Amino acid sequence: MPDAGQPIEPSAPADLTPQAAEGAHTPAPPPAVEKSFLVQRFAKIKLGAIHVVGYSVAGEETVTQVPELNVCFDIGRCPYFALTSDIVCITHGHMDHLAGLPYYLSQRYFQGMKPGTVLLPRELERPVDVMLRCWRDVERQSTPYTLVPMSAGQLHEVRRDFGIRAFATHHGGVSLGYALISIREKLKPEYVGRPGPELAALRRAGTDIQYRLEVPLVAFTGDTTAGPVFDNPDVRNAETLITECTFFDADHRTKAKAGKHLHVEQFAAVVLPKLNNQHIVIGHVTRRTSVRRARHLLRRIVGEEKMRNVHFLMDFEGSVNEGEFDQAGPPPADTAE
Ligand SMILES: [Zn+2]
Ligand SMILES: [Zn+2]
């Protein structure tokens, strides 16, 4: 990584050379514009009716948005796109997942958007509330916000037909994952095909002719190691599961264990066989391993067939160099959306 605390000096404009100042007989070509390489690139994956937008690198930043459902999982450093989600679900208190929260709330207020709603583990409600009150004083702006303390198994109803259920994860401290649930009222099979007036009469008479159908659309585990979380039906059956696999190289097994993260060997042997998801998105890959190599190592264990519905969040143009960040020069110009 570059040395922290080293200020980045702006380079001198290219045309302030003596020759340029004196003026040349032939018109000089326009000075080359030095494009900044300090451009953060974000992922955008289309999976059926939704998109997964985000950035997730272990220890650096994790923020993952599903714009169609108005929800952002973790907030990272609050990149600009994350401001558009009305709801943020915080999985745990690590800085790389949470740092942007005051910025998210403050900017939304500043820009006239409605106050952000933040779901978070119950144990974090108090310290996060204290932090946000401090920010009000620091910034001298009475930023409004709503904190919703959550426990494993608790359902937060956003609308009659849409809710967010928390589930326990295994990351060493207080941590939760979240499932976005579509809630539908369906006619019980025995009443299907009956005429409308008859159904209306039954309803008036107090007969319960409907049942509640819950469909987990998206589940986000955040940081976790293997454990009962992957037996949870919301996690196993969500149409899209966004989870982590941080380490891939054989000599990173102890790091995975110490940090309570998944190693690819665990992911392949214990986690993947349990999953019924249409789409599986892997984030939080360490910078120590390139995404291309991570995919190669997973494929080597599970085979091509099992890789068909597995996506790496950070697998986009240019991301092949993620692991070589230290050695890499400026990444190519940002041509992604
Ligand atoms: Zn993390
Ligand atoms: Zn963490």
Image (cartoon, rainbow, N blue to C red):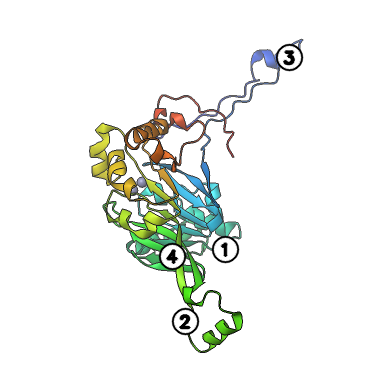
Mark 2 = which residue?
A: 208
Disc 3: residue Cβ within 8 A of ligand 1's nearest atom: no
Which tag is nearer the camera, tag 4 or tag 2?
2
Q: Is residue 171 left or right of residue 243?
A: left
* Dot 1 or dot 2, earlier in sequence: 1
Give the residue type that dot 1 points to: Lys
- Mark 1 packing: few (<14 Cα in 10 Å), some, or many (20+)? few
- The residue mark sitting in front, 1 or 2, is 2
At 50% from the left and 51% from the top, the residue drawn is: 65
Q: Nearer the viewer, residue 203 or 166?
A: 203
Relative horizontal placement of residue 64, taking residue 299 as reference (left or right): right
**Residue drawn at x 49%, y 49% as measured from the top left:** 78
Could you tell me which secondary element the residue under label 4 belongs to?
Answer: strand
Residue corresponding to mark 4 = 147
* Furthest-bottom residue in this view: 205
Against 272, residue 32 (above or below) is above
Label 3 – label 2 distance at C-alpha: 88 Å
Image point (59%, 33%), residue name: 335
- Amino acid residing under circle 3: Gly
| Secondary structure of residue under mark 2 | loop
Horizontal and vertical percent position of residue 102? 46, 55
Residue contact between numbered discs 4 and 2, judged by CB atoms under 8 Å: no
User: SS at mark 1?
Assistant: loop
Q: Please give the residue where the numbered disc 1 appears in the rendered image.
A: 114
Mark 3 or mark 1, which is nearer the start of the sequence?
3
Q: Quadrant of the N terminus?
A: top left
Which of label 3 and label 4 is nearer to you? 4
- Ligand 1 contact, mark 1 (Cβ < 8 Å): no
